[in-house]
């Protein structure tokens, strides 16, 4: 596949995911674990797409937009490196390092586009709101959401059309201490991502499951996929037990209320 065809294909997939995310789904549909395998399937290499999706999801796990922070654009970075690995022969290790740099640059690009493009629409929205023209207001919102992804799609096309060689040469021109810093950062980010998630989700009651899963995979050599299946069954059992307990408490509360009415 030529560089142009590869760039067009990846750009189309990126644009479709962007539109689906804007109108029909949550932002998690644009995570690498979803985008990379689908793009890999389109490009004819699902295995590489799955491997990249898992590695990039681990790399960017826990990264989210909190307050005024500018998180890495994992969607755009995942799309670009997946296309380059499958279509241009970029090695996996270089792709992970490259994704870190692309994510930061793409985040700045996305923020700039939002400020300029969406900011230009604000006076029009205010005009329609002041005139109570709800149809025009809704129509502009739909058009704005439909057009907004085009700017990042152009960036995806341009980056992939340049090819892995151009990006590799660009990386080679970067001083070695910066490249090493990116490599160290890419190695630390999975631990940071897991730490952020555990900080949000950690519970003393649930900690037993975490340590059980760790011990089972490390010391007993249980396959990770099998551990996921076990976790699903444990989760379902706990959910059903809590629902059953809730129904029983409602029944007890209802019978207590009837006794109060009878003897009150």
Image (cartoon, helix red, strand yellow):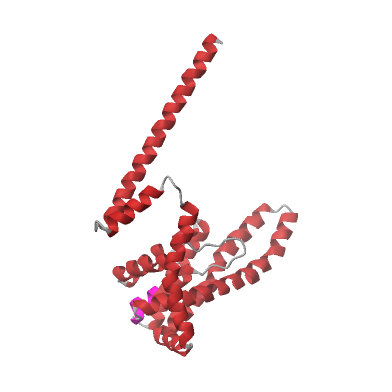
- Which residue sits furthest right? 130
Looking at the image, residue 108 sits to the left or right of residue 46; the answer is right
Between 205 and 4, the residue placed more toward the observer is 205
Quadrant location of the C terminus in the rendered image: top right
- Where in the figure is residue 2, as x and y percent of width and height? 36, 83
Which residue: 40% across, 87% down? Answer: 165
**Which segment is the magenta one?**
82-89
| Quadrant in which residue 138 is drawn | bottom right
Looking at the image, residue 19 sits to the left or right of residue 69; the answer is left
Between 216 and 154, the residue placed more toward the observer is 216
Between 177 and 31, the residue placed more toward the observer is 177
Q: How many labels does the image show?
A: 0
Q: In the image, is residue 126 part of the stretch drawn in magenta?
A: no
- Where in the figure is residue 96, as x and y percent of width and height? 40, 75
Q: In the image, is residue 86 part of the stretch drawn in magenta?
A: yes
- Where in the figure is residue 209, as x and y percent of width and height? 36, 49
Which residue: 55% across, 64% down? Answer: 146
The answer to whether residue 143 is above or below residue 241 is below
| Quadrant in which residue 8 is drawn | bottom left
Looking at the image, residue 55 sits to the left or right of residue 74; the answer is left
| Quadrant in which residue 4 is drawn | bottom left
- Where in the figure is residue 32, as x and y percent of width and height? 42, 66
The answer to whether residue 14 is above or below residue 89 is above
Which residue: 42% across, 86% down? Answer: 168
Looking at the image, residue 26 sits to the left or right of residue 42; the answer is right
- Magenta span main SS: helix
Quadrant location of the N terminus in the rendered image: bottom left
Between 209 and 2, the residue placed more toward the observer is 209
Which residue: 39% across, 77% down? Answer: 95
- Which residue sits furthest left? 221
Residue 25 seen in render: no
Residue 103 seen in render: yes
């Amino acid at each position: 596949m030529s560089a142009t065809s590869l760039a067009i294909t990846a750009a189309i997939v990126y644009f479709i995911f962007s539109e689906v995310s804007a109108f029909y789904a949550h932002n998690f549909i644009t995570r690498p674990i979803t985008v990379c395998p689908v793009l890999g399937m389109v490009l004819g290499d699902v295995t590489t797409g799955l491997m990249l999706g898992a590695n990039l999801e681990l790399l960017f796990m826990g990264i989210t937009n909190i307050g005024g922070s500018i998180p890495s654009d994992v969607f755009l970075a995942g799309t670009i490196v997946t296309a380059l690995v499958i279509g241009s022969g970029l090695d996996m290790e270089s792709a992970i390092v490259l994704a870190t740099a692309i994510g930061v640059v793409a985040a700045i690009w996305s923020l700039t586009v939002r400020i300029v493009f969406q900011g230009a629409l604000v006076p029009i929205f205010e005009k329609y709101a002041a005139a109570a023209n709800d149809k025009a207001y809704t129509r502009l919102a739909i058009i704005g959401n439909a057009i907004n992804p085009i700017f990042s799609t152009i960036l995806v096309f341009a980056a992939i059309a340049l090819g892995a060689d151009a990006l590799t040469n660009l990386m080679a021109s970067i001083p070695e201490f910066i490249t090493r810093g990116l490599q160290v950062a890419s190695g630390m980010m999975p631990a940071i991502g897991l730490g952020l998630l555990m900080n949000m989700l950690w519970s003393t009651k649930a900690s037993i499951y975490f340590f059980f899963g760790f011990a089972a995979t490390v010391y007993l050599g249980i396959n990770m996929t099998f551990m996921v299946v076990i976790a699903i069954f444990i989760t379902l059992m706990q959910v059903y037990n809590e629902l059953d307990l809730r129904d029983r408490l409602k029944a007890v509360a209802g019978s207590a209320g009837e006794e109060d009415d009878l003897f009150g």
